[in-house]
Image: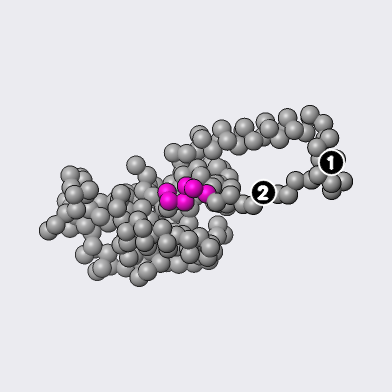
Amino acid sequence: MHIPADLQGETINVKWQARFGDPTGRKMVQDSKPPVRVRTSPIEGRGLVATRDIAKGERIIEYTGEKVTKAEAERRYERQEAAGRIYLFDLNSRYDVDGAKNGSIARYANHSCDPNTETEIARGHIWLVARKSIKAGDEVVYDYNFPLDGFEDRPCRCGTAKCRGYIVGASSAGALKRVLNQRERERKAKRTSGSKASRTAKRGKGAKRPKTARKSSAKRTKRKRARS
Ligand SMILES: [Zn+2]
């Protein structure tokens, strides 16, 4: 079997191998139905819900789709972002997996700031793995691990006590907090420094036109990513 250079040396899931003999888990998933189905979600659109109790550590479903180069993913990203949902998953430094093309229902899993699953990449396969025990009927969610850039366009509605307000990965939570705090300070400072500027604006003359929306330069990295 040929293993791409960037995947060589990757450790396989030993526990899984001991239990099922197939380190990729492919056979297992093909032979048995994954314990999730698609349902309308209170978080957003459609989501994944557990059809039975799932034990902590269980591989729930593989995130499959078409394996595409970063350049191709870039083109698809534009279209998917315009349509409102991103199905591209960052597989490694060279490829993404596009769940929109022949993908499994794993692509419907929503983001949560306090997720019950996490993603794991093993031998070029992306898995959703239970990080705690999940009850039948619970929505299956994971942290999309999006970077901070462009967070304003991604409000989070996960509804958990730990919600960060925006779809931003746990690893960027501190940075998000600092940005939000800074903006809050600036807003307060503006309010207390008098409203001369806003009076000028109201009169119309000399009012500045709003700047056109800035295109985010961070697009390239805005994909679902496994937590490292
Ligand atoms: Zn949230």
Residue drawn at (21%, 64%), measured in percent from left and top?
A: 27
Distance from label 2 to label 1 (Cα)?
Answer: 18 Å
Q: Which amino acid, by three-letter code, is at mark 2?
A: Lys
Report if the beta carbon of the residue with label 2 is closer than 8 angstroms to ligand 1.
no
Quadrant of res 9: top left
Q: Earlier in the sequence, mark 2 or mark 1?
A: 1
Look at mark 2 in the image and give the residue it sits on.
211
Q: Which quadrant of the rendered structure holds the N terminus?
A: bottom left
Disc 1 under 8 Å from ligand 1? The reply is no
The label on residue 145 is: none
**Mark 2 crowdedness (10 Å alpha carbons): few <14, some 14-19, many ≥20:** few
Q: Is residue 86 left or right of residue 99?
A: right
Mark 2 element type: loop
Q: Position of residue 134 (x, y in %)?
A: 41, 53
Q: Where are the magenta residues, as a range? A: 216-221
**Vertical comparison of 184 with 114: above or below:** above
Q: Residue at x 58, y 35 (%)?
A: 179
